[in-house]
Amino acid sequence: MTDHSVVSREQWLQQRQELLVKEKEITRLRDELTKERQQLPWVKIDTDYLFTAPDGTRSLADLFGAHSQLIVQHFMFGLEWTEGCTSCSFWADNFNGTTAHLAARDIAFVAISNAPLEQLQTYATRLGWNFPWYSAEGTTFGQDFNVTFAQTAKDKNQIDYNYKTQNWYTEELPGVSVFTRDDANTIFHTYSTYSRGLDNLNGTYHYIDLTPKGRNEDNGMSWLRRNDEYG
């Protein structure tokens, strides 16, 4: 940091304006990409998923509430885990307060994990979260959307994740899936993203990216802690 160049305000402004041209180009390209994403074809959902909720069981259709669009955060929290994934918890710290704004745009938002509901509720209380969170225990929801990997994948040491086959195994990985429904309550899968595709959904990372040191993740995400674990 101490070796970084220091210039006059005029020199800084010139370079900042040059960078702004590139930033605007990325913004334009992102807008174009958003339009292409919205034009993707849909896939009809034929499986009757039932999730465990605080007030009983809910179908996938129930998770929409009064809305026609649904965003599902695939949160890594396995059946026998005592805590949720640290990085998924980092993302989840960005969720509080978003649901009201999404609802205003006809969008429901929920997180879904495989752990029993009681585990999810205890963990959410511990970390101060209030977004809707449901258990997919006993369903194939995670497997069907390529974030939960069965024994057969373990036996082959091979998973299908982020739209390609990968020669390694892990029990769970993160993702986001988007659904919509029509007036007949037919549900369609419209989009899913995984891995670095999730970066755009983490506001904290975008703030970090504005700073001189940036993410500084030469050792990966080893710096990361749950929000109640920092010293």
Image (cartoon, grey):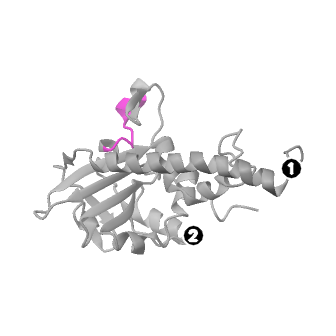
Disc 1 target residue: 6
Q: Amino acid at mark 1?
A: Val
For label 1, the SS is loop
Quadrant in which residue 128 is drawn: bottom right
The residue carrying mark 2 is 126
Q: Quadrant of the C terminus?
A: bottom right
Identified at 32% across, 64% down, the residue is: 52
Residue at 39% in and 43% down: 148
Question: Is 174 in the magenta?
Answer: no
Regarding residue 212, the answer to whether it shows in the image is yes
Find the distance from the CA under tag 1 to the CA under tag 2: 44 Å
The amino acid on which the numbered mark 2 sits, given as a three-letter code, is Arg
Above or below: residue 149 compared with residue 165: below
Marked residue nearer the N-terminal end (1 or 2): 1
Q: How would you classify the magenta stretch by its main secondary structure?
A: loop
Q: Position of residue 51 (x, y in %)?
A: 29, 60
**SS of the residue at dot 2?**
helix
Of the pair 216 and 5, the residue shown nearer to us? 5
Stretch in magenta = 145-154
Asked if one can make out residue 85 in the rendered structure from this viewpoint, the answer is no
